[in-house]
Amino acid sequence: MATRSTPDDAGSPSGTVRALLRMIAQHRELAVASQPVDVHGRLVRVAGLVLEVTGLRLPIGSVCLVEQAAGPEGQSIEAEVVGFDDDRLYLMPTGQLLGLSPGALVTPMERPVHSPGLGVDSHPWRRSTDRMRHLPVGPGLLGRVVDASGRPLDRAGPLAEVRSEPIQRRPIDAMEREPVRVPLDTGVRAINAMLTVGRGQRLGLFAGAGVGKSVLLGMLARYTEAEVIVVGLIGERGREVKEFIEDILGEEGLRRSVVVAAPADSPPLLRMQGAAYATAIAEHFREEGRHVLLLMDSLTRYAMAAREVALAIGEPPATKGYPPSVFARLPQLVERAGNGAAGRGSITAIYTVLAEGDDQNDPIADAARSFLDGHFVLSRLLADSGHYPAIDIEQSVSRVMHNVADEGQLALARTAKTLWSRFQRNRDLIAVGAYVAGSDPETDRAIALHPALAAMLQQPMNERCGLAQARDALAAVLGSDEATA
């Protein structure tokens, strides 16, 4: 009696076919696993700012070089993987698309090794499976102005004393962070007296155009007690970069600062990279135990760049044209700042948020307000009346002030804020003479103290006021004897 052949019977025809198919599948798996690092892909489509590439299998965040058919010989365009669909990768460039042609060669970019004394463009390359973007960090960046790719913009020669580190990192675990307990002297009287800041706090500076945002940032950069200042100029006008450095930051401020500039004409991916790079530089100095002040101008331009990237790869818009991923990226960036683990340094971060049309309910402003540790609102009404810095103490708040200021300071700030608010609520009645003196004792006191309080909250940009001086000035205005406490 003949026996039935089984699938595993190698002697049968069906068994031979199955064994052959298994060998082919295993060969393909081994070929993919052992894929050489110099494998190439091909450019098959360009739609707006998105490059579609076939023939490569890379994770999101990998960096590639796209060959140019025209332009300087040997020059290629850097592009980053931002998405994929089956066997196609979606890349966005960090430079101009001029010179690209169908079928252009696309090569995964190896990670550079940054050696002391070498310029960014002359670093040797090494074979590595880590193709995420690494940029130079280190003490050699102090006093320098670089672009979002770590290339010097100040014509002061190549970078020295730097090493290559990834610009995308995970935030410190919430239970390992040191709480905000130490007050930080910003040198600005209105902030020190009414909105005391803590070391490691993340703050938003909400402002429309032309209300003194850049001047206030310059004051914070020059006067804040910090060992290192990192300034990220993201998406702003190109002319403002040099003006901010020379006219507002100044030579003294630049000496302990690192400036990362990604102006408005940069591709959206480069603007986002500039914000991540500035944060990575601040993290590097924090890990060395230093206290860092991170100033980013602006968080709104970062969100706009993220919106351009998300819409370009097909993500649907949600809130006022912003896709959902934008609101996920914002806290991911902000949470990287703050205090480090016990015994480490800190990053006190101030992000400017543009209020379009002075609308404080703009979706980005509203979202930023929810995950920041406080916000300063600059008022156009105050700016138009010549009140600088134009900080609206009614709408502004420091959420950690109760942790870093004593009860006397808190009581002074509450009293001053109450008197200021009472005057503002009755301003129209007072202006037309409809308010009758003696109708309300607190309103009478608010009217009497308003000129002195308004003068105390103003400050010339070339003047510094410490924490103790600010408290004494506020106590003097309120007629309190707590100035000597």
Image: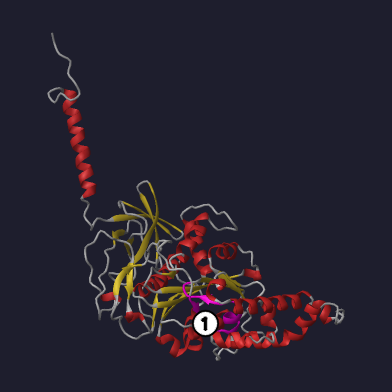
Judge whether 77 appears above or below 317 on screen: below
Q: Residue at x 22, y 71 (%)?
A: 124
Q: Secondary structure at mark 1?
A: loop
Q: Is residue 47 left or right of residue 29?
A: right
Nearest the camera: 294 or 464? 464
Residue 356 visible to the viewer: yes
Counting the numbered discs, the total is 1
Q: Is residue 163 left or right of residue 385?
A: left
Nearest the camera: 366 or 184? 184
Give the residue number, with chain letter if any, for mark 1.
186
Q: Position of residue 160 (x, y in %)?
A: 28, 81
Q: Position of residue 181 (x, y in %)?
A: 48, 73
Where, quadrant-wise, is the N terminus in this rendering? top left
Q: Is residue 178 magenta?
A: no
Judge whether 225 appears above or below 198 on screen: below
| Residue type at numbered disc 1 | Thr
Q: Which residues are magenta?
A: 182-200
Q: Is residue 192 magenta?
A: yes
